[in-house]
Amino acid sequence: MFNKILIANRGEIACRVIATARDMGIATVAVYSDADRDALHVKLADEAIHIGPPPASQSYIVIGKIMDAIRQSGAEAVHPGYGFLSERAEFAQALEKEGVAFIGPPVKAIEAMGDKITSKKLAAEAGVSTVPGYMGLIETADEAVKIAGQIGYPVMIKASAGGGGKGMRIAWNDAEAREGFQSSKNEAKSSFGDDRIFIEKFVTSPRHIEIQVLGDKHGNCIWLGERECSIQRRNQKVIEEAPSPFLDEKTRKAMGEQAVALAKAVDYSSAGTVEFIVDAEKNFYFLEMNTRLQVEHPVTELITGIDLVEQMIRVAAGEKLKIAQKDVKLDGWAIESRLYAEDPYRNFLPSIGRLTRYAPPPQGRQDNGVTVRNDTGVYEGGEISMFYDPMIAKLCTHAPDRKQAIAAMAEALDEFEVEGIGHNLPFLSAVMQHSRFQKGRLTTGFIAEEWPDGFAGVKLSKKTCEALASIAASCNFVYQQRATRISGVVEHHRRVISKDWMVTLDGHEFPLAIERDGETLRVTHVGAKPVIVDLGGWRPGTSLIRARIGRSAFTVKIERKAQGFRVRYRGADFRVFCRTPREAELARLMLEKQAADTSKMLLCPMPGLVVTIAVKEGDEIQEGQPLVTVEAMKMENILRAERKTKVTKINAKAGDSLAVDDVIMEFE
């Protein structure tokens, strides 16, 4: 077994590998760029080596710099994590030449499966069902349009060396094929240093289901169940679960056996994933094979009890698998929610900055058989950089069945506190509450179909709003009581707290009366019976409340604001005003502040780098016309015209770094 391994990666996956290595008694070496000098993986590793400037193209994916770090540290093996160099055959070759073990598959398997075009040909030869498409390289946008027309729209334009949603576009017509080809090519070049593109048929109403495989260097290979990864946005997975709520045992077995057949065809060893597209009739088609550890591997670990990182290390050290196919048992249900630094209220645009608050829910196994796990690479006070992908953490729950796993995830998301940046916690909560998700009726179009106009928060029922009004009123009462106990105030001079209050939230007004009842509070809404509110020991200044109203439990994030609070619960985020009846009466007379008119400006919606300006001053532009491409967190974002107008001024140029709301251009 190895004494020391280097992790050629960053963030949560580097921290994940370090955790298992530590359990195995193996020393670890981290590498870091200037931007990651204070990163969590650097703090956790036994030693850390600096490898260059923030851009990955100048640090994490420079093979020479990683090799220098290996020599400097004396590491005997390297775990590549995912992304970066994890599927670069030349990196594995460099390690082999250096006499350092690669904790991953053989070079030939990486070459065969890492290239999406070659992998599809090999899959077909191995008897694996494949999607129709054009497997040759495509050089120009005109050629892409021609081929797409021959295959038949819709088509998927993909980077041959791609992964993680990078370099992928769906095209429904010639214009989208032309535009998608160039964007995919640019993203592929930026992310992988390889801009080769191919096109295949896009299966409508598809599910994305993948099979985890595990092989050793002695010819043994098994599959460890499947993962449902259909909840995606821009081809990037958002929520995954294992097993799939859709597959039957017959289909599951067929997919598993084909995945193993493909792995054996390339003498695969280590952990890998064979991805399939599955249609409504349970027909499945090979999509690609990822010759690395997947982001969503924790859900497989939770339902199988197998530590995949440990198995990868043991296989790389030459050990035989001690697990046979008959030993693989799927236990319960696991769900993973990817917490991203993306603002769902701004069309999921990247957000950067300092984490002023970062408090995950308690981890471990609970008395009710639920396990909560959070894989992360950040900490409170750390910064989210614009140079890397926007993942903050992967929150997982495991329970005896799917219904309980969803309920546990909803509760864990309620407890997760993140402040200082925009993030997708509200959206993840909304998905957990969505009836279609709860019923398991999923496709890769789920997000686009259910939120076609973007995410604007969750509309809670009036009954839930009433409960939140009771909680907010109780918190306000506690604040009022504290204000009466100011030092130096004589007891009989203390002011009397009003019993009657008007609580306003989410368009509803709730007149109510409140009074203390021992350690709890009695709240009476007009025309209703009193309810007992227990704030669970909450104290002013605490941002999380675990309250109970009768038998119902509510985990609520709360922040003191003028005349009330900001309250967040189950994907809803709103101001709550707690006023006396007279204050509420006067508040209704107040004018609302009007937002500034920015309709004649194009504002940068995210911090990022200007890639191209597609228009010039004086141009007449049409609705939907591309104006600017901004790159942020390794993804290109095309900003389009919202109406027909004329460009009067351009304030940015290609190569400029922009902040949120910087004015890029102005219109007539």
Image (cartoon, grey):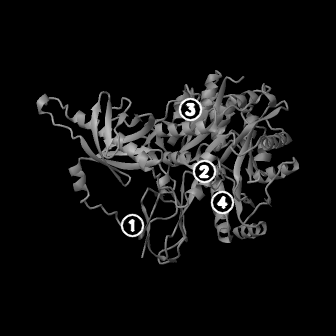
Q: Nearer the viewer, mark 2 or mark 1?
A: 2
Q: Position of residue 563 (x, y in %)?
A: 27, 47
Q: CA distance from mark 2 to mark 4?
A: 25 Å
Quarter holding residue 472 = top left
Q: Nearer the viewer, mark 3 or mark 1?
A: 3
Q: Nearer the viewer, mark 3 or mark 2?
A: 2
Name the foreground residue: 582 vs 196. 582
Q: CA distance from mark 3 to mark 1?
A: 44 Å
* Circle on res. 598: 1
Visible in this render: residue 185? Answer: no
Q: Which residue is mark 4?
A: 169
Q: Position of residue 81 (x, y in %)?
A: 65, 38
The quarter of the rendered structure image containing the C terminus is: bottom left
Q: Amino acid at mark 1?
A: Thr
Q: Which residue is mark 3?
A: 372
* Circle on res. 493: none
Q: Amino acid at mark 3?
A: Val
Q: Answer whether labels 2 and 1 touch (C-beta < 8 Å).
A: no
Q: Is residue 341 above or below residue 182?
A: above
